[in-house]
Image (cartoon, rainbow, N blue to C red):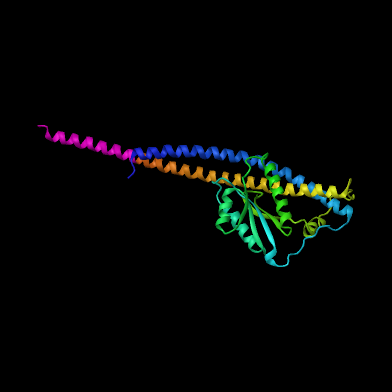
Amino acid sequence: METLESLRRKIEVSKDIKSVVRTMKAMAASNIGQYEKAVNSLDDYYSTVTLGIVAYFRNNKIEMTSKKQEPKGKEDNLICAIVFGSDQGLVGQFNDSLADFVSQSLKDLPGKKEIWTIGERVQLILSDAGFEISKSFSVPNSVTAITPLIRDILIKSEESHEKEPLKEFYIFHNKPNQRAGYSPVSKRLLPLDAKWKQEFVELKWTTEKFPQVIGETSSVLSALISEYLFVSLFRACAESLASENASRLSAMQRAEKNIDELQDDLSSMFHRLRQSSIDEELFDVVSGFEALNKDLPK
């Protein structure tokens, strides 16, 4: 049975928890701004890089020199999925929904699968789902920390691609929606084959003037591809971090609302119990007074 002291302790604890929730809510709201700004900047840069690749193809009018070699059998196809999750909790279904999307997407692709994870939480979920986790990375805690992570991933992917030339790379991450929330998305990153080229051939040049490429064509294409891979991974990481903080902000808002309701319930219980205790004491005083009056001589 609850007592006044136990209810008072619960009220004080709820105040401390609410203070922590407010702090985390403010941090999440602050982080969302920098990541959304990075994503908006990357959209313009990504558009510039893709237009540069379109300009190269239109200017040279040649086929890709390196085409994807088809594997002999489905079991020979090697697929690597780079999954951007979170290291910290209190993000709702952020990692669970992403892991379900990865499992469903990879199920339709033939061949052997391996997973590279960014974040411990999603790594544990995918491991429990039966996937092989080949490499794991820590989630960057700021925009400036994204660049070293992407460079490390690109180096590892290049080394892995040299060992297994038939390997395909896919990116999986959560992307913020226009109004609210987020949705899991995927993108095929490697190999840079005829299918990859076709995506750029179908793009239209923005003006009526034909583009020109200045300099050695091979070095220009190499630089454009390098920037394309970098900005694709950078944008995926920034969108994932923006979605993570949006999910955490939403979770903290729900937690703050639940704490307010709990505090109202605890305060009502405390006041009712205190009033009941006061009534009992008054009743004892009145009963004692009446008993004394009966014993007094008339």
Question: Residue 46 location, x and y as percent?
Answer: 76, 47
What residue sits 71% from the left and 48% below the top? 155
Do we see residue 168 in this rendering?
yes
Nearer to the camera, 164 or 237: 164
Single out the residue that lies furthest toward the top. 297
Is 280 covered by the magenta stretch? yes
Q: Position of residue 215 (x, y in %)?
A: 89, 45
Q: Is residue 127 left or right of residue 62?
A: left
Where is residue 94? Give x, y as percent. 58, 51
Magenta portion: prevailing SS class: helix
Q: Is residue 277 left or right of residue 151?
A: left
Q: Which one is nearer the viewer's eye here, 39 or 119?
A: 119
Give the x, y percent position of residue 250. Answer: 56, 46
Task: Name the quadrant of the C terminus.
Answer: top left
Using the rendered view, name the quadrant where residue 39 is placed: top right
- The answer to which quarter of the image holds residue 294 is top left
Q: Residue lying farthest bottom?
A: 73
Residue depicted at x 71% and y 67%: 73
Question: Which residues are the magenta region?
Answer: 273-298
Image quadrant where one finds the N terminus: top left
Q: Is residue 5 left or right of residue 178?
A: left
Q: Is residue 202 magenta?
A: no
Q: Quadrant of residue 70?
A: bottom right
Asked whether residue 189 appears in the rendered view, the answer is no
Is 175 in front, or is 273? 175
